[in-house]
Image (spheres, helix red, strand yellow):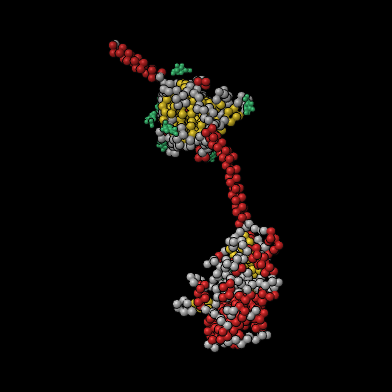
């Protein structure tokens, strides 16, 4: 009896001990905010609760998951093999992304067999499944996803959808986020709008209908669900399950739950919306500040850029202008077409390239070029002229000479004057200067006929300058390199007057002697005055040069001692074998008498006494044979007090290693 009673008491106690267990089985709960200390909610992953009670499923950490589970199991079935009871839940959520137009990946309300999902992965799996478990019925997971990225692998329709998921990320049914309002019209909702929104999930155990409804915050629950499906969850859910939220990030997004209620066998208790915690005041600034800055940048920097580019352009144009600036003074206007544009000359010579340099002399360098318009070949002599003194006279003379046209003068096309340089433009002489055919064992030499032609040409040019032109023009720099050969090997005298530019000045004390060593007559050196007779002297030296093929000043022996060609020829003459002085390149096929005549004429022209030198008119007569050269003897020359002494030359060349250069104070 006692035992029976004991048994009854035991049974009663055991029943009693079982009763609290079944009665402790939670069927409903409500969270109007998650103000700490938080009871019955476990936070996993990067999920935290903010001090004001926001459940922050994820923060800005990338590629992470966060979970929040109600820690107590929920009895979904009355018996293990029974059917799932009706249940209902509602929650308010918000999604905030650092980038306003983009967020990832989303969040989900989840019913799972455990209060954790340790194997679930982030990103598109939303912390619900992983690549292996996805789609496996042994998951026993029911979820409602709020997906902000359209993953094609799960047949997502868009990047702003609500879906019902059973054991798989591939939704059973899904819909673009939105709601049906009172007048039965569909309004879309933007999940990542940062605004709080409410979701209702309802399961009916009789119809097996699952409804997911959504609405803006503080909006009544719409009558029409957003998405629904009919599915008996009895095979999916176990008797006791855990409910919670899952979220995963890919990019920098925050997923918030503001409030949550749940109930089995009945409608979820309504949330007291006014009690819900406030979302942080996300200054729209953060990103908009960037936009505003960008706007500022575009407002300030683009014009700034524009202005600086404009400045650069203007500077470039000014530089170009200055580069091609023309200096035209009043007195030049009368020269008209002789005054050429620097720009044209610059382009003609392709910027005075080294490649087109024909040669350099005492006054400057000569460049070959092609006139852009006429395609005419030109030679541009670039004379640097630091002092402006005498420039006007020089230009006037050069241009007046430019007006001359004589078949034995190099035609002057024009000039250009610019800052401290002067450009003289001549016709290009394709065969170069005479010196190239005479000295340094040339590849091409001229035969005697050609040489006579050259001599006659130079003589008639000089005659023209001295006597035929309106006024007497003294060349001042007659020499082989200034005798140019045109296409027909016709001699053309060039570079007249340049020496004058150098020896400017009216004061005889300071007047410098300009010309070229070897061609300078003793009287010119003594007085510093150039006369027609000094031109004749230089012509005489040129005659000897042409006939002998030797430089006017030559190295006589190993010691480097220099001697004048003049003295050298004179020596032969004194010895009575003047013909031995002729150029060995000439061979024997030349008129010996003519060679002798040229040599003697050369000596006569180079007579140290200017009065003894013939005029160019006489020279022409001698050359043509109209007059016969007076029969001079070397003795007479000496008798006349000729002094072609080396000593005198040394006086002027001491210290100068450049023999064939000019004396102008430049070198
Ligand atoms: N019109 C021209 N056509 C072709 N070549 C030329 C022309 N003018 C000059 N040259 C070449 O340019 C070279 C340099 O000439 P440049 O007049 O500057 O020197 P130079 O005659 O030796 O000395 P100087 O300065 O005393 O005249 C000459 O040796 C000649 O070969
Ligand atoms: C919700 O559950 C609590 C006990 O946790 C209970 O007191 C309350 O009556 C329940 N509310 C409803 C509406 O069932
Ligand atoms: C996100 O939360 C986790 C857990 O609280 C924390 O370790 C991490 O530093 C947080 N990251 C950011 C970017 O706030
Ligand atoms: C539940 O169903 C399984 C088979 O589906 C069966 O083995 C078991 O006995 C059932 N349990 C109850 C309590 O009915
Ligand atoms: C999940 O729950 C089952 C029983 O409900 C338990 O056996 C299992 O260990 C749990 N798994 C984890 C990962 O907690
Ligand atoms: C589902 O998961 C179970 C247990 O993890 C496993 O044995 C089974 O092979 C999985 N099924 C599929 C189709 O992957
Ligand atoms: C996506 O849906 C289409 C039909 O709507 C189906 O043919 C396709 O296989 C599905 N893709 C996946 C990955 O399930
Ligand atoms: C329902 O939505 C439509 C479209 O946005 C709107 O025109 C209509 O006024 C809304 N009705 C109510 C009652 O708010
Ligand atoms: C998906 O949900 C919509 C909206 O509730 C519903 O009209 C449609 O029938 C559902 N489709 C499926 C396959 O359940
Ligand atoms: Mg010259």
Residue 581 at x, y percent in the picture = 54, 84
Say if 326 sits above or below 642 in the image. above
Total marks drawn? Answer: 0
- Of 33 and 78, nearer the camera is 33
Q: Is residue 99 rendered to the left or right of residue 610?
A: left
Work out which residue is located at the far top of the displayed protein and give it: 1
In the image, is residue 552 above or below residue 594?
Answer: above
Q: Nearer the viewer, residue 70 or 628?
A: 628
> As rendered, which of 148 and 645 lies closer to the eye?
645
Q: Position of residue 190 (x, y in %)?
A: 56, 32
292 to 29, vertically: above or below: below
Residue in the picture at 45% in, 77% down:
559
Q: Can the viewer see residue 230?
A: no
Q: Position of residue 525 (x, y in %)?
A: 56, 73
Q: Residue at x 61, y 62 (%)?
A: 389
Residue 476 found in image quarter:
bottom right
Q: Is residue 292 left or right of residue 373?
A: left
Q: Residue at x 68, y 85 (%)?
A: 626
The quarter of the picture where the N terminus appears is: top left
- The percent coordinates of residue 391 (x first, y second) are 63, 63
Residue 567 can be seen in this image: yes
Q: Residue at x 53, y 73 (%)?
A: 660
Horizontal placement of 475 versus 231: left or right? right
In-front residue for pair 572/427: 572
Residue found farthest to the left = 2
């Amino acid at each position: 009896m006692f035992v029976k009673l004991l048994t009854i008491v035991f049974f009663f106690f055991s029943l009693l001990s079982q009763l609290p267990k079944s009665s402790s089985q939670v069927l409903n709960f409500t969270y109007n905010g998650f103000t700490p200390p938080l009871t019955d909610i476990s936070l996993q992953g990067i999920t935290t609760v903010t001090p004001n009670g926001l459940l922050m499923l994820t923060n800005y950490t990338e590629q992470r998951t966060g979970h929040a589970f109600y820690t107590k199991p929920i009895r979904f079935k009355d018996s293990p093999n029974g059917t799932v009871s009706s249940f209902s839940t509602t929650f308010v959520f918000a999604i905030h992304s650092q980038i306003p137009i983009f967020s990832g990946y989303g969040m989900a309300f989840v019913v799972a067999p455990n209060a954790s999902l340790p194997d679930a992965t982030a990103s598109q799996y939303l912390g619900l499944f992983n690549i292996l478990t996805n789609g496996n019925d042994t998951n026993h997971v029911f979820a409602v996803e709020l997906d902000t990225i359209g993953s094609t692998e799960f047949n997502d329709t868009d990047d702003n959808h609500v879906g019902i998921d059973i054991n798989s990320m591939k939704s059973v049914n899904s819909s673009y986020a939105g709601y049906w309002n009172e007048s039965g019209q569909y309004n879309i909702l933007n999940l990542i709008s940062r605004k709080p929104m409410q979701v209702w999930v309802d399961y009916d155990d009789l119809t097996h209908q699952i409804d997911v409804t959504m609405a803006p915050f503080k909006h009544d629950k719409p009558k029409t669900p957003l998405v629904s499906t009919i599915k008996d969850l009895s095979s999916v859910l176990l008797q006791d399950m855990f409910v919670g939220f899952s979220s995963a990030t890919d990019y920098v997004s925050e997923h918030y739950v503001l409030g949550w209620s749940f109930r089995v066998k009945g409608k979820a208790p309504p949330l007291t919306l006014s009690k819900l915690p406030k979302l942080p005041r996300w200054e729209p600034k953060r990103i908009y500040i960037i936009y505003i800055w960008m706007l500022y940048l575009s407002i300030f920097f683009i014009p700034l850029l524009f202005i600086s580019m404009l400045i650069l352009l203007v500077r470039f144009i000014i530089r170009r202008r200055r580069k091609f600036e023309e200096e035209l003074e009043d007195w030049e206007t009368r020269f008209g077409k002789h005054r050429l544009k620097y720009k044209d000359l610059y382009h003609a010579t392709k910027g005075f390239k080294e490649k087109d340099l024909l040669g350099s002399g005492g006054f400057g360098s000569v460049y070959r070029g092609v006139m852009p318009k006429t395609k005419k070949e030109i030679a541009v002599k670039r004379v640097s002229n630091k002092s402006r003194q005498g420039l006007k006279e020089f230009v006037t003379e050069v241009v007046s000479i430019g007006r001359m046209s004589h078949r034995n003068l190099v035609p002057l096309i024009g000039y250009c004057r610019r800052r401290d340089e002067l450009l003289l433009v001549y016709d290009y002489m394709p065969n170069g200067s005479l010196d190239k055919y005479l000295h340094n064992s040339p590849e091409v030499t001229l035969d005697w006929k050609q040489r006579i032609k050259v001599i006659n040409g130079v003589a008639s040019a000089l005659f023209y300058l001295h006597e035929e032109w309106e006024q007497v023009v003294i060349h001042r720099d007659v020499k082989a390199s200034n005798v140019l050969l045109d296409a027909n090997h016709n001699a053309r005298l060039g570079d007249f007057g340049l020496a004058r530019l150098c020896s400017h000045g009216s004061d005889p004390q300071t007047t410098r002697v300009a010309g070229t060593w070897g061609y300078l007559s003793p009287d010119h050196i003594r007085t510093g005055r150039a006369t027609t007779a000094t031109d004749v002297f230089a012509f005489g030296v040129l005659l000897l040069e042409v006939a002998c093929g030797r430089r006017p000043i030559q190295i006589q022996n190993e010691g480097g001692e220099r001697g004048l060609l003049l003295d050298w020829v004179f020596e032969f003459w004194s010895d009575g074998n003047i013909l031995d002085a002729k150029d060995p390149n000439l061979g024997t096929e030349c008129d010996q008498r003519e060679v002798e005549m040229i040599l003697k004429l050369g000596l006569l022209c180079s007579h140290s006494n200017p009065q003894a030198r013939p005029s160019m008119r006489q020279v022409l007569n001698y050359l043509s044979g109209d007059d016969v050269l007076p029969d001079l003897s070397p003795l007479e020359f000496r008798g006349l007090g000729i002094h072609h002494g080396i000593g005198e030359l040394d006086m002027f060349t001491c210290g100068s290693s450049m023999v064939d250069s000019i004396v102008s104070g430049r070198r």
